[in-house]
Amino acid sequence: MFRHLAILAFLLVTPMNARAAANDDAALTNGKVRIAEENGDNGYRVPKTAAYSVIRDKMMKRQVLEEYVKFLSPMRLAKTLWVYVDECDGGAGASPYYSPGDRSMVMCYQFMKMIEDRAAFITQIEAKNPKQFPMRVTRDGFIAGVFAGVILHETGHALFDNLSVPIFGREEDAADEISTFVALQFQPQVADLVVSAYADIGETFSNPPTEAPDTKAADYPKDKTDQCFADPFCAFADVHGAWGQRFYNTLCIMYGANPNHYAFLRTGGWLPADRDCPGEYAQIRHAFATTIYPFIEADLMAKVQARQWFIPREQK
């Protein structure tokens, strides 16, 4: 254990340009993380809804599945994790999920469409009121960052299951924490992109109302996920935390990881002065080092950390 902690500490403080070469993709392989192909679709299922065909083409061009397999190459998993993209059940609000029954990570075309629509919305809001969000994002950066943050969240669920990680509290909270923590282990440009977008998605969704909605009203949402957001019983009783709380929890982990880099979160009034965010971050880091890190190949992790995961237009 002490050797694992020592290596982890080294990786988290060593400058990126002192680590393994970023373009060593050949080494980023893992037989336990595999794309679930079906009828020659390369893991990108043909959607039932024609409108998602464009999204499928974009995801194939961006090679999201192939990139995900490389990203998880350092993990020594107990059982094979399968990954694919599909038009998921749940309507327009369907989100990526981990299925423990068949140990599959499923990415959803609907979610990518939702992020693209939300990106236009959030950039308009930021243009009108820059102070509404702690960090500015571009359209492409928001899409890439939110997708990465959510996939990291679902990866947390997959690792908890695959490695039999014991969890105190709600698993959804733990998945949020591991998503933010892992993103913060990368070079600042990558970390800022993911954590800022992941935080902002929580800020753009409204917190639940205090009264039950009128289900017969003309503006009552058709999507089941949106219906839950509009219903205080469903939203507050859900396994996920309220969006507002998830937003501030993410900011706290960010600040706790690097108080100097994210000092504006404290000085700008985004966090209460008496919240011990460095202590919360240390708690998450200890949990990760104890339960997840022993199953990571340190040399491959260095290559993953050094690799450029986002294309230029996503980083602007």
Image (cartoon, rainbow, N blue to C red):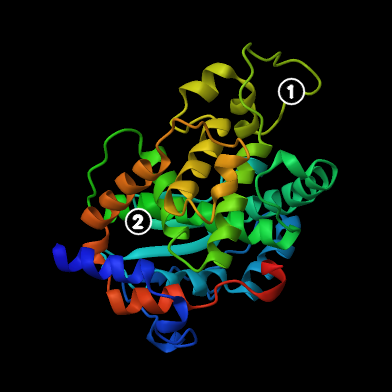
Residue sitting at 60 percent across and 71 percent down?
A: 310
Residue sitting at 66 percent across and 34 percent down?
A: 223
Residue 36 occupies which quadrant of the picture?
Answer: bottom left
Amino acid type, mark 1: Tyr
Q: Is residue 117 above or below residue 31?
A: above
Instruction: Please give the residue where the numbered disc 2 appears in the rendered image.
Output: 103
Q: What label does residue 192 carry, if any?
A: none
Query: Which part of the image, by quadrant, shows the N terminus?
Result: bottom left
Q: Secondary structure at mark 1?
A: loop
Label 1 crowding class (10 Å Cα cut-off): few <14, some 14-19, many 20+?
few
Give the percent coordinates (x, y) of residue 283: 30, 45
Residue sitting at 35 percent across and 73 percent down?
A: 301
Direction from residue 250 to residue 6 in the image, left or right: left
Label 2 crowding class (10 Å Cα cut-off): few <14, some 14-19, many 20+?
some
Q: Secondary structure at mark 2?
A: loop
Give the percent coordinates (x, y) of residue 65: 51, 69
Residue sitting at 62 percent across and 64 percent down?
A: 46
Of the pair 271 and 306, the residue shown nearer to us: 271
Q: Is residue 228 above or below residue 262?
A: above
Give the alpha-carbon distance from disc 1 to disc 2, as whole Å.
Answer: 35 Å
Give the percent coordinates (x, y) of residue 29: 37, 80
Of the pair 267 and 30, the residue shown nearer to us: 267
Instruction: Please give the residue where the numbered disc 1 appears in the rendered image.
Output: 220
| Earlier-in-chain disc, 1 versus 2 | 2
Q: Visible in this render: residue 78?
A: no
Of the pair 7 and 237, the residue shown nearer to us: 7
Query: Which part of the image, by quadrant, shows the C terminus?
Result: bottom right
Amino acid type, mark 2: Arg
Q: Visible in this render: residue 109?
A: yes
Direction from residue 120 to residue 98 in the image, left or right: left
